[in-house]
Image: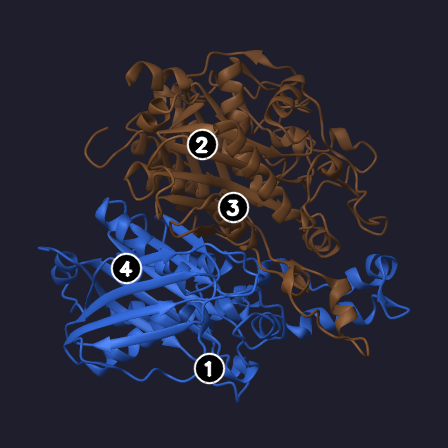
Chain colours: A blue, B brown
Amino acid sequence: MTDPIVVTGIASVLPSPEQPFASQVDPTPFLTVRKSRKYLSPQDDLAVVAAANALQKSSMTRGHLGLRAGLAVCVGYLSFDRKDTDPVLAVSVEDERFSMRRFSSEGMRKTHPLLTFRCLPNMPAFHVSVNFDLRGPYFCTYPSAAQTYTAIQRAIDWIDDDEADVVLVGAVAHQRNFLVEHHLARIEHPIAPSDLRDAGAVIVLERRSRAEARGAAPLAIVERPSVRYQPRVPYAPGAPAPYERWRFDKLHDEPLAAGDFGCAAPLVQLERWIERRQRGLWEHDAQTRDGAALESAWEVLA
Amino acid sequence: MTAGRHRVVVTGMGVVTPLGCDVARFGAALREGRSGVGPVTRFDASGFSTRIAAEVPLGECALEGLEIKTAFAVAAAKSAMTQGQLCGSLPGLDEPGRALVSLGVGLELFSMDDLVASRREGFTMPAGGLERYTLMQTPADLPLHLIAERYGCREAYEVHVSACAAGTDAIGAAFRAVRRGAARWALCGGTDSMINPLGFAGFCTLDAMSRRNDEPARASRPFDRTRDGFVLGEGAGVLLIERLEDAQARGATVLAEILGYGNALDAHAITEPHPQGAGALSAMQRALRDARLDASAIDAVNAHGTSTPKNDPAETAALRALLGDRARSVPVVSTKSMIGHLISAAGAVEAVAAIDCMNAGVIHPTINLVEPDPACDLDYVPGVAREVAQRVVLSCSYGFGGMNAALVLGHRSRAERRS
């Protein structure tokens, strides 16, 4: 390939579960309107901070983006916070049951006025677009690594079809909350809540020629990732056992970072290999519980 | 086809809407200008500031024991497949890895009842099956898996969560996949229902919905000076799309051709669209460029037309900029005036409405447009359907958070003539 699509920026945000989320992930410095901070959910925070750091690594500013900049984002499962639901619930129960009468008279008043903004799954994309001026094509998807792969495929299509010069691909998962913990504990091959990590990651993709013309160093060449899918009823027994593997130069499997990063996992691990600055081919393959088999290859350049 | 660019046609359509659950009845009701809006019956909404919605008559839709958003999508997909008569009709169409499901979906359904129950002493999780999988929270991608499993769709499924633009984006993405040969055929569209206590409460706190509770059928009034917000609807729309040559080879009836798709971000503000509809204009221009047409080809527009104070003038400004001198002579209609806002399903159901109108040679009206807003100065076909020959129609959806998407749809006769 004469002018491959390359990664010119990559960043992940991995707050420690031992400390409060807000003390570790603060998007405020990157917001064009600081008072908009109140609208952001943890998933939005992860997306904005990861995007800011990835753009900085790629030596790009708002001026490089605009109408020719695309955005493809995968978000994790719905992540209500207890601090949003508990006050509503506290006044909406009667005889140990949810009471519509009490909810509509009292509970509704306790519903946080910004709840809708904070739980819509396209909001991470919105906050990235508005704060870094991305006005090109978009793709908002959900909820697991297979869709992160689809987001990467979409970015490659846009560049191949000359719809965008640069694309940010992100994946964000706020998993340390009761609703996601509940879901991932009830499914086949469950994940213990203690293994779940909040994670956000963003990569910047563009043509090698464009990167070099603006003096940016390509970090890795991406080959088109593939997703194979064996459809199945998700609640029927027999879900495939999930696994994820990264192999360097076809020699050996590399140990992965500990914890479950949800839909951000492929990009979180990729950042580790790029940061290691070990030239060579990194191959990823994974199997998801919902029947998707993923394969990709990344040639790390520096 | 040109190299790597198959022509893509619609051969099946299915809907679940407040005006009925089959396409013929839905289309007829639209052309009659009937409203599907009424008092909320799904739960006691007496304490809410808005107490009206456009509900699907559940007795007409087979729920199969599923929660309603999932059931809507499954039912609409079944109708589309039945109309398209695809299964087993052409060797190769069922080869693994070539069929795609692409759906716009809304928020995961979160159950307050289940949350309370789960905190009761002695509560035990259901042992397995659907009951366990959907307790408290139903993953929004459930309908995609069920549809893919039922019809053997093995291309990587696409979940679109771009809010009110999701249904249009899902169709557009599937169209692109079939056009470039990545998928042989696809079921694509959207499904949604937020007519539940928490969904309703969220929109009420935003003060986004009409409070015209005493006259529900008149509450959704796109482009009218007295509009006061949108009416929440629910439902699903699914299209069966495939290559033109496949449809012809198996003798399928072509309903329409999909000619182009584009989307664009506003990057403007969280609570309102760009006042001049900059993102909307970009999306429409990209869709036309994708279709290799210019704006002079457009015979009609199925607008987003939400009936909110800010959407309608912004959308009008974008259409004015796109259509130029023709702006006031191209009919622009809002299906939401009759069925409310179906959120993630809106674009899909409106694409069905647009195709049905094209094939009938009649464009449905925008109802409740009585006092035109001076900022909304296009031909919105107020009140009564109109005979209009439509060869190319633009169908547009604009989502909360600045997501804008547009489809260019062509009359089925284009496919017959150019093939």
Identify the chain of the residue marked 2, using the numbered disc in the image. B
In space, the residues marked 1 and 3 are separated at their CA atoms by 40 Å
Query: B201 or B9, which is in the foreground?
Result: B9
The residues tagged by marks 4 and 2 sit, at their Cα atoms, a distance apart of 30 Å
x%, y% of residue B99?
39, 43
- For label 4, the SS is loop
Q: Badges 1 and 3: C-beta atoms under 8 Å apart?
A: no
Tell me if mark 1 has few (under 14), some (14-19) or many (20+) residues whose alpha carbon lies within 10 angstroms of its own.
Answer: some
Q: Residues within 10 Å of mark 2 (few under 14, many from 20)?
A: many
Distance between mark 3 and mark 4 Cα atoms: 26 Å
Q: CA distance from mark 4 to mark 1?
A: 28 Å
Tell me which numbered mark, 3 or 2, is placed earlier along the sequence. Answer: 2
Which quarter of the rendering shows the C terminus of chain A?
bottom left
Which residue is depicted at the point 65% across and 31% down? B21
Q: Amino acid at mark 1?
A: Pro
Residue B86 — which label?
2
Q: Give the foreground label among 4 and 2.
A: 2
Residues under numbered marks 4 and 2 in contact, where contact means CB atoms less than 8 Å apart: no
Residue at mark 4: chain: A
Q: Say which chain tag 1 marks.
A: A
Above or below B328: residue B273 = below
Extreme-left residue of the structure: A2
Write down the residue under mark 3: B150
Q: Going 24% across and 44% down the picture, which residue do you hit?
A: A161
Tag 2 near tag 1, CB within 8 Å? no
Q: Are marks 3 and 2 in contact (CB under 8 Å)?
A: no
Q: Is residue A48 left or right of residue A213?
A: right
Residue annotated with mark 1: A15
